[in-house]
Image (cartoon, helix red, strand yellow):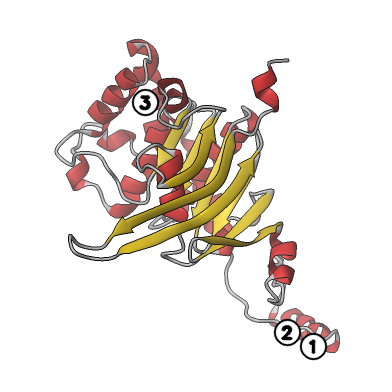
Amino acid sequence: MDPSESLPVIDVRGLVRSYRRGFWGRAHVALHGLDLAIASGECVGLIGPNGSGKSTLLRVLAAIDEPDSGQVRVFGADPDARATRLATGFCPEDSPYPTELRARDVLALLGSLRRMEHAACERRAAELLERVGLAHVARERLGRFSRGMLRRFCIAAALLHEPKLLLLDEPTAGLDAQGFAAIESLLDEARARGTTLLVSSHLLSDLHQRCERLVALVDGRIVAQGDAHTLAASLGVAARLELCFEGLDADSIAELRRVAQARGARLVGVQPAQSNLVELYRRGAAARRP
């Protein structure tokens, strides 16, 4: 076995990153001596409020920002090393691509930068645009895309070269059910290939079902980590579960509410599940395939 395979894919020690607000502004410390290790093939979720440092950490790992101090290793090397960049896919919170370029041209350019063979890049780009529901606008300029369309495009761009490490910053922001369905399928396939995932969100519900470990970040510091229940307990927060039922009438729901109250719990609310719409789009897409 290659000795590098036993090393963490991400190894961060004592990471400090700050930036200035305005030319004369004081330095704001976004990350305070952060330590984090992620093993090969692991799926880790970064959870925290806006401004907690999640995006800053991902930008450092993607070699967009440089740390002020500390050690950052990705695949045992500097994040800015060419081999590391070629093995990493990054989907930032906002689209970084020129809005005057067409979707397929952006993917062709990215494929060239990532040393993909031209024909293979065209096939992969066409496949991904179809999977994320953008094949019909492949020749459209990105400036005409809605926020949800841009989100789907950025995720496709990050997956273009089938990276070994995938960094996703708020991937579900602005997505509709069709986008959720596409992302779920693509991420499942990436996991099956052994891809290591680091996904950030300010919503716990976006992450807890997919990630093996959650890391809570507050004011640039890790305050807790573990699975969803361990995380809630360590933060002193009552754990909340989502249960999905089919075929319940109003009387059955009322009975569930009474049972919950008798056990010292509370039925917080009843609403249609998001997964219903996701499954609807998934089945519709399958029906359209030849």
Question: Tag 2 or tag 3, which sits nearer the N-term?
Answer: 3
Q: Position of residue 69 (x, y in %)?
A: 45, 46
In the picture, measured across the screen, residue 188 lies left or right of residue 232, that is left
Q: Nearer the viewer, residue 121 or 1?
A: 1
**Element type at marker 2?**
loop
What residue would you read off at disc 1? 261
Q: Residue at x 64, y 49 (%)?
A: 211
What residue is pinned by disc 3?
125
Judge by depth and name the residue closer to the eye, 261 or 11.
Answer: 11
Residue 26 drawn above or below residue 289: below
Which kind of residue does numbered mark 3 sit on? Answer: Ala
- Real-space Cα separation, disc 3 to disc 2, in angstroms: 48 Å
Mark 1 in CB contact with mark 2 (< 8 angstroms): yes
Q: Amino acid at mark 1?
A: Gln
Task: State left or right for residue 238 relative to residue 54.
Answer: right
Mark 1 or mark 3, earlier in chain: 3
Q: Is residue 178 visible?
A: no
